[in-house]
Image (spheres, rainbow, N blue to C red):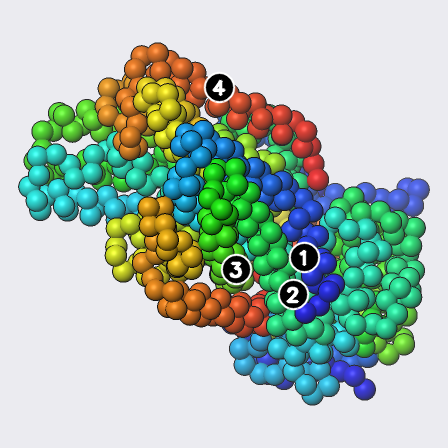
């Protein structure tokens, strides 16, 4: 079984630790590398793709390191984040050149197959410099697939794609994963990962926050308590009412507002207007706490 | 050597505005040669002076800088070099293929500029063409290799390269005697001095002996190529400024 | 001001939630402020201030060379108790021409090529900033940065001369003349460099192109002047300084301020020459600005 193994990998740049003691195994199928911006996803991908050595720990593909071993690229396909390509060439020529550089025996057939799989046979004779961002991404995919690699690494592949292209790419990744390719892509958008990744690895601030099956992690996340900030005409009475109702876990009174923590937020959200009405309190402001991925992640990390 | 890398490199080196600048520089050389002919009445010593100073001192280093950086610096800066590096090709092969294209282009442009320039400016039995053509070829090979290495080693290859070529060789060499010994231009002039030994009036001199010059040229060339290859092996694709 | 809509409340099945977006009704600083900010940011960026250390390296190293030279010249003046500065102010900019050229050549593409490559011009222009404002801000920014690059070491030279107890009035007078010429030089170089840089999205190539232009212009001008001096006359030769921005400013300095030209073997430029060369200067600057405006008129986006 082909697999990328990271064992106790850390990477630092001077005083900044970008990746902090990460251990994971990426096997066949689609894995999503999830994390907010600046979490270290690109650093991890750079190490896995052999462009950065770990400061400590080991990164290996089936036991052999990728760093300073260009032969490994026979089996690895890389879709980099960098925008620039050889802009003056046509899509066909560019992918063909990549096929030749991979020392493939029949570059023409490989190019055709790669371009077909990303649905770029139509504009194949147009110059890359004239392409939209989504089309460029697809050409990048084609260059990564042209040698039918065992491992496919993608850095934020869905950036700039329209919904139709995204669906197409998702299907493609799923096919590859089902066929046994090790597919790893990075993203900071949960919904993208949802559709296609069997396993996810969550990275926050360089540390591994969660890993495993997507659905079970999702469940873990929904179990966390939600926070609300409320300001009303009479905070204290409202606090008392909420507490005696029992739909919230904790209520904190601050000089200007009410902070409520509720794990069963469905129940709380239904209860609140009812309580306010019953006590004749008017609600001025009800704000849910930051729902961003960052807060979710930081919650995961602190657990 | 890999043909595909060479083809891609040749394409990006010559396929855009850069080649216009190179042609313009060659044309500039010929215009200046023409002016010199007018000014000096086709005197060979004026030609020799022009080639030793203007050509070898300024034009050739600038051309080699444009070419030496042109074969690789842009791809490193915008990250597109990843398409060459993420392949089962030894980095040595990639580096040498690119350098070969650079050396070829440099030789063509520089030697053509100088030889045709000499013809325009006034020569005597092709003596200056041969002598300074040789110097030009040798200097171009070494300059191009050095600038190629600088492109991989530095973020600002053009400025670093110019600090070396113009500040070091042009200015400091005039003030500090020791510096003259460590100058590609002086080394390249040695064979010319030797070939034109019969015409001391033309004032083609070098501060370095012939054998020493060849040895130093070779060492510098090899060192530059070695440094370039080693650095390419560990290059991480960086995001530009 | 906002209330959480209970999930499920619908009229016809679709709901728009008020998630607390606040409209900004307060004071907005206007177009002038935007212009000023872009200007300041260009100047700061030229020296790498506010950017990571790697970016600071090149301009700071070059500035270091400039100040070191000034300090050494001062030391020589003071220690040898000379009657006049060891390096006259007018000579400083001309001697340091290569460093000044490198500074501008590095900073002009930085100011312009990145914006072209990343296609951010529509972002700039969807604000109160007008297209012309963008060009003027960049131009002024690079000019001021270059001016500072020359003027600060020049001022260090003045300090040294004053410390060496040379005639203060005379020194300050000559110093201010040099500062004026430094400003002219800065504007000329910046305009031409930005014009060249605006033609390419590639920063590295922009730097190379500008340096090539400056270096070859200097070398070319030197040869042309020599030849014309020889074949025609010294006075005629002086006109051909126009090919080299540094020599041009030097010649203008000799005409406006009555000092000797620094570049070797140049004839001081008289009134007529000064008039002609000043026109050339103005024409070059106007040309550069026009080119820049046209370039950014065409470049609308990606």
Q: Which mark is residue C167?
A: none
Q: Which residue is mark 2?
A: B97
Evaluate if marks 2 and 3 touch, with contact meaning CB atoms under 8 Å apart: no
Image check: A140 left or right of A35? right
Residue A80 quadrant? bottom right
The chain to which mark 1 is attached is B
At horizontal 81% and vertical 60% (from top left) the residue drawn is A95
Mark 4: secondary structure: helix
Image vertical order of residue A247 relative to residue A219, above or below: above
The chain to which mark 2 is attached is B
Q: Tell me where residue A258 appears, x and y as whole percent.
A: 60, 54
Q: Which residue is mark 1?
A: B9
Q: CA distance from mark 1 to mark 3?
A: 17 Å
At horizontal 78% and vertical 44% (from top left) the residue drawn is A130
Residue A207 quadrant? bottom right
Q: Which residue is mark 3?
A: B141
| Dot 1 crowding, Cα within 10 Å, few <14, some 14–19, many 20+ | many
Mark 1: secondary structure: helix
Nearest the eye: A134 or B83: B83
Image vertical order of residue A147 relative to residue C218, above or below: below
Q: CA distance from mark 2 to mark 1?
A: 8 Å
Mark 3: secondary structure: helix
């Amino acid at each position: 079984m082909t697999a990328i193994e990271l064992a106790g990998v850390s990477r630092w740049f001077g005083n900044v630790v970008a990746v902090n003691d990460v251990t994971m195994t990426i096997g066949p199928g689609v894995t999503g590398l999830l994390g907010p911006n600046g979490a270290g996803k690109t650093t991890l991908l750079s190490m896995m793709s052999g462009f950065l050595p770990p400061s400590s720990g080991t990164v290996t593909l089936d036991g052999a390191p990728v760093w300073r071993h260009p032969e490994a690229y026979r089996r690895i396909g890389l879709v980099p984040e960098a925008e620039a390509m050889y802009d003056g060439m046509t899509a066909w020529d560019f992918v063909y050149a990549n096929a030749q550089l991979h020392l493939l025996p029949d570059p023409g057939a490989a190019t055709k197959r790669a371009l077909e799989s990303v649905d770029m046979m139509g504009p194949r004779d147009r110059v890359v410099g004239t392409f939209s961002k989504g089309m460029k991404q697809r050409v990048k995919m084609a260059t990564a697939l042209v040698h039918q690699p065992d491992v496919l690494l993608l850095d934020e592949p869905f950036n700039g794609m329209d919904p139709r292209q995204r669906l197409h790419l998702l299907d493609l990744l799923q096919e590859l994963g089902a066929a046994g390719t090790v597919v790893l892509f990075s993203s900071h958008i949960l919904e993208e990962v949802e559709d296609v990744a069997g396993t996810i690895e969550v990275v926050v601030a360089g540390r591994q926050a969660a890993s495993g099956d997507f659905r079970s992690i999702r469940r873990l996340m929904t179990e966390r308590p939600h926070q609300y900030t409320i300001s009303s005409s009479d905070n204290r009475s409202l606090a008392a009412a909420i507490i005696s109702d029992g739909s919230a876990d904790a209520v904190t009174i601050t000089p200007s507002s009410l902070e409520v923590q509720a794990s069963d937020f469905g129940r709380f959200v239904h209860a609140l207007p009812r309580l306010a009405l019953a006590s004749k309190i008017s609600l001025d402001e009800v704000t849910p706490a930051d729902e961003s991925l960052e807060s979710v992640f930081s919650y995961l990390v602190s657990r | 050597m890999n043909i595909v890398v060479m083809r891609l490199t040749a394409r990006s080196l010559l396929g855009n505005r850069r080649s216009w600048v190179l042609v313009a520089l060659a044309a500039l050389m010929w215009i200046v040669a023409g002016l010199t002919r007018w000014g000096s009445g086709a005197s060979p010593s004026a030609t020799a002076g022009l080639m030793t100073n203007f050509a070898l001192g300024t034009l050739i280093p600038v051309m080699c800088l444009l070419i030496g950086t042109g074969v690789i610096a842009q791809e490193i800066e915008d990250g597109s070099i990843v398409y060459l590096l993420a392949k089962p090709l030894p980095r040595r092969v990639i580096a040498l293929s690119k350098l070969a294209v650079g050396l070829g282009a440099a030789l063509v442009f520089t030697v053509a500029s100088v030889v045709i320039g000499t013809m325009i400016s006034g020569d005597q039995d092709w003596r200056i063409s041969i002598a300074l053509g040789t110097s030009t070829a040798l200097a171009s090979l070494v300059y191009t290799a050095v600038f190629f290495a600088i492109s991989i080693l530095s973020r600002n290859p053009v400025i670093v390269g110019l600090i070396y070529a113009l500040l070091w060789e042009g200015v400091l060499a005039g003030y500090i005697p020791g510096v003259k010994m460590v100058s590609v231009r002086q080394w390249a002039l040695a064979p010319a001095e030797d070939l034109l030994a019969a015409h001391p009036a033309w004032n083609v001199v070098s501060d370095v002996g012939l054998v020493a010059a060849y040895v130093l040229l070779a060492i510098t060339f090899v060192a530059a190529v070695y440094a370039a290859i080693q650095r390419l092996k560990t290059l991480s694709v960086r995001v530009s400024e | 001001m906002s209330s959480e809509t209970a999930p499920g409340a619908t009229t016809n099945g679709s709901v728009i939630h008020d998630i607390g977006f606040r409209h900004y009704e307060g004071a907005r600083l206007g177009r002038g402020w935007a212009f000023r900010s872009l200007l300041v940011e260009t100047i700061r960026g030229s020296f790498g201030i506010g950017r990571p250390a790697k970016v600071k390296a090149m301009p700071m190293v070059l500035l270091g060379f400039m100040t070191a030279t000034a300090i050494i010249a001062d030391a020589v003046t003071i220690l040898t108790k000379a009657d006049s500065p060891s390096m006259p102010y007018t000579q400083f900019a001309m001697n340091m021409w290569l460093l000044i050229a490198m500074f501008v050549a590095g900073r002009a593409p930085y100011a312009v090529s990145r914006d072209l490559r990343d296609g951010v011009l529509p972002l700039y222009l969807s604000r109160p900033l007008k297209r012309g404002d963008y060009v003027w801000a960049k131009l002024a920014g690079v000019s001021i940065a270059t001016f500072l690059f020359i003027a600060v070491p020049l001022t260090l030279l003045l300090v040294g001369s004053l410390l060496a107890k040379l005639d203060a009035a005379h020194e300050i007078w000559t110093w201010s003349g040099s500062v004026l010429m430094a400003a002219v030089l800065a504007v000329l170089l910046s305009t031409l460099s930005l014009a060249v840089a605006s033609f390419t999205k590639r920063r590295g190539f922009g730097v190379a192109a500008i340096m090539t232009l400056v270096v070859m212009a200097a070398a070319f001008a030197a040869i042309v002047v020599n030849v014309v001096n020889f074949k025609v006359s010294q006075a005629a030769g002086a006109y051909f300084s126009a090919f080299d921005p540094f020599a041009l400013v030097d010649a203008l300095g000799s005409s406006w301020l009555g000092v000797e030209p620094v570049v070797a073997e140049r004839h001081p430029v008289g009134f007529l020459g000064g008039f002609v060369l000043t026109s050339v200067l103005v024409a070059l600057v106007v040309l550069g600005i026009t080119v820049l405006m046209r370039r950014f008129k065409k470049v609308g986006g990606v």
